[in-house]
Amino acid sequence: MKLNPLTARKLKRFRSLRRGYYSFWLLIVLTTLSLFAELLVNDKAIAVRYEGEWFFPTYADVRLGDVFGLEGEAGSTPVSYRELKKVFEAQGGQNLVIMPPVPFGPYENLAYDGILRATPPDAGRGHYLGTDTTGRDILARLFYGFRTAILFAAAFTAMTYVIGISLGCMMGYFGGLFDLLFQRIIEIWSNIPFLYMVIIIFSVIPGTYSISARIGILLTIMVLFSWTFMTYYMRTETYREKARDYVSAARVLGAGSARVIFRHILPNTISTVVTFIPFTVIAAITYVTALDFLGWGLPPPTPSIGELLKQGTANLTTAPWIVSSAFVALVFILTVVTFIGEAIREAFDPRKFTTYK
């Protein structure tokens, strides 16, 4: 696809801003890796070869130990692939277990010495960042927590912008009573306290709701209280653009309102909207982390940076590695996205690339 010269100049400028450009690719790589987290951080084996037959347990149902020749209690319970690997190595022969680089699951409680407790980082056991207060590997929780946060932020940004851009364009284009009515609605809606609504709604949601349903409800609530900022911006931009000659020409040629808005006005305002996206992602990650910290965010036991921060602050003297790991991870994510946002804002600055003749 051939880009128009103006877009090509903007992308060239973005590539020249090394800090933001490299941060963009770093985020892409991390996000892509997180989509395949089950192959990288998991207590299930990637592949098992037993008596010449291959098994791929990562995305399969739970298997009992007797499938792989284990006897007694180990044969009648779900197989521990870490222990199975030790058994196969002790036996020698052709049987093989291939484990992920981090062989621990985000929901797996490990009771060393028979006690569920926080343990410090121990490379010998494979816990490079230690475990939390219930014996779950912190690196595994952070990796899955990053995936949850970035996908949640992406969904939040997309839904917020679809609502805000569509409604804002219509308010600016049609004006009059339509514009006035929605201005009053937005003013009232903006004064409803967001945090109280989250607390009230999650207080009455039945505990029988699935984790995915509760995450969907949280996402919906956040979107419903966050679309107004984009609406006001698009209203102003559309109101200004509709007075330009190209809009009048489109009307004369018979273009309908929808075509004028989405095929003519929107493409001429979208470049500025792009500069807001990284900062909206930052806001979404910050919101969900704060809600998790307060206990009103993602439902347990969903991996979450905010939940680790809550654990860490409650055990600051006895398990400082929890809060330090979560804090460094959060700062790293927000810094990378901020660098991207600064580069996009610089590259797509309309004062440098947009002219009207």
Image (tube, rainbow, N blue to C red):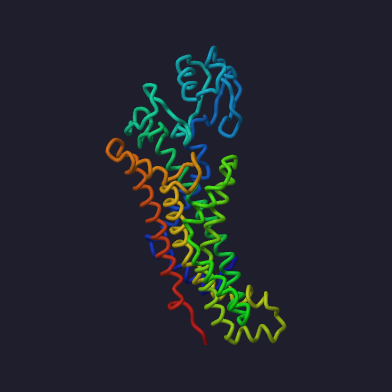
Q: Is residue 250 left or right of residue 340?
A: right
Q: Residue 337, how many percent across, how many down? A: 42, 57
On-image quarter of the N terminus: bottom right
Q: Residue furthest top?
A: 72
Residue drawn at 49 percent across, 18 percent down: 88
Front residue of 343/242: it is 242
Q: Residue 346, how many percent across, how many down? A: 41, 70
Q: Is residue 216 left or right of residue 10?
A: right
Q: Residue 167, how many percent across, how many down? A: 60, 71
Q: How many marks?
A: 0
Residue drawn at 60 percent across, 76 percent down: 181
**Against 330, is 227 above or below?**
below
**Against 159, is 59 above or below?**
above
Residue drawn at 52 percent across, 68 percent down: 228
Q: Residue furthest left?
A: 317
Front residue of 327/288: it is 288
Q: Quadrant of residue 253?
A: bottom right
Q: Residue 194, how many percent across, how many down? A: 48, 59
Front residue of 283/102: it is 283
Q: Quadrant of residue 48?
A: top right
Front residue of 158/313: it is 313
**Against 256, is 28 above or below?**
above
Residue drawn at 42 percent across, 52 percent down: 290
Q: Is residue 137 left or right of residue 262?
A: left
